[in-house]
Image (tube, rainbow, N blue to C red):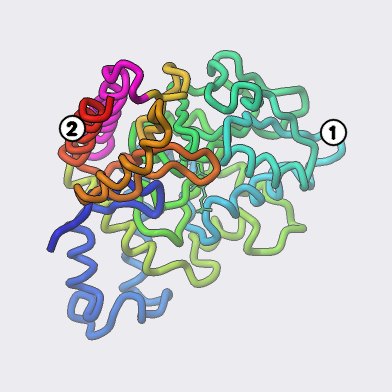
Amino acid sequence: MKRKLNFYAGPSTLPVPVLEEIQREIVDYKGHGLSIIETSHRSKEYDAVHHEAIANIRELLEVPENYYILLLGGGASLQFGMIPLNMLHFAGDDACADYVVSGSWAKKAFGDAKRLGAVNAIFDGKEQNYMTLPPASEIKPSAGSRYLHITSNETIGGLQFRDWPETGEVPLVADMSSDIMSRRIPVERFGVIYAGAQKNLGPAGVTVVIIRKDIAEAAPEQLPDYLSYRVHAEKDSLFNTPPVFSVYALNLVLRYLKQHGGVAPLEEAARRKADLLYQAIEESNGFYRCPVDERYRSQMNVVFRIADESLEPVFLEEAAKHDMVGLKGHRSVGGLRASIYNAMPLSGVEALATLMRSFASRRS
Ligand SMILES: *Cc1c(COP(=O)(O)O)cnc(C)c1O
């Protein structure tokens, strides 16, 4: 078996031992004579997986007791609507919400909220082509704001918050889809954190929502059940059939992370891996360039261009010959992007940095 070096932005690379464990267990789960994906979600076998996954998230991210951890379907994209439905839409005529419009994903979150209530773009990176962020200290909620929404890591633009805004009584809501579990986070400073699993946590199909209990419990009665955080919280995310395969695989990833020391070493690894690539870019004498403001460059998605853009497809072809896949930039922005999530080993990033140096020296 030869595994490729997988730089896809999502779904993305997973730890091989996790894939192997799935392979071992998929036909006969722990001697029960059936697969976990053929088992009732009300069975004690699934129940154990479900609650272990929740407990593992709580432990790894040090989530305080006054937060629920929900496992939902619909992707992070459903949260773009659920947040304003639960926290803004029914909150009265004076209510509004604040958004930091930092790139493609924030724009989507903002767009959904706009349909459901009064929203303020308290920052919009449009004029700088979404290549920079506001300093966290300058992000302040507006009067009447029900929450302030940020995107901790813009997966497409390659921008990441380093510090968190101080929003006082106004809940801070963060889409952490593409950097959750890559660093320690002060959960108590957030009202809601949400993340689709398919970047750092597992396969697609499950979304993790960490929500302060009082916020979930205040969900309006008018909402359809599935759209209410309160309903999911009351039922421990077993209101309806959960995405059982995704939760099972998520739990295996979480166990794997725990066995390897939890989040702190991942934070260190993320910094080292990203530094390697940004160094290769900086040391190329302008052959490569990273368009993103140095202060906010992502440690998960390294976006770069070749000065002579006609060489980009050539670089991708060479990378493919070296068994590196997923390095093409998002179709909306072009260029190149290396997504280096938790499960990408340092050696994979070293191989990419080596290829970048050798390509530059041959082609300049
Ligand atoms: C991938 C991604 C999403 C969308 O996730 P889905 O699960 O596909 O809905 C939202 N926000 C960010 C930051 C992402 O990286």
- Is residue 48 left or right of 231 when viewed as pictured? left
Q: In which quarter of the image is the C terminus?
A: top left
Point 64% across, 39% down: residue: 107
Circle 1: residue type: Asp
Q: Mark 1 points at which residue?
A: 94
Q: Residue extending furthest bottom?
A: 33
The answer to which quarter of the image holds residue 38 is bottom left
| Circle 2: element type | helix
Please state the horizontal and vertical placement of residue 357, each as a whole percent of the image.
Answer: 21, 28
**First in residue order: circle 2 vs circle 1:** 1
Please state the horizontal and vertical placement of residue 176, each as a whole percent of the image.
Answer: 47, 40
Is residue 282 a member of the stretch shown in magenta? yes
Mark 2 residue crowding within 10 angstroms, few (<14) / some (14–19) / many (20+): some
Region in magenta? 261-288
In-front residue for pair 327/133: 327
Tell me whether the residue at label 2 lies in contact with that at label 1, contact meaning CB atoms closer than 8 angstroms. Answer: no
**Magenta: main secondary structure:** helix
Asked if ligand 1 lies within 8 A of label 1, the reply is no
Q: Mark 2 points at which residue?
A: 354
Q: Residue extending furthest right?
A: 93
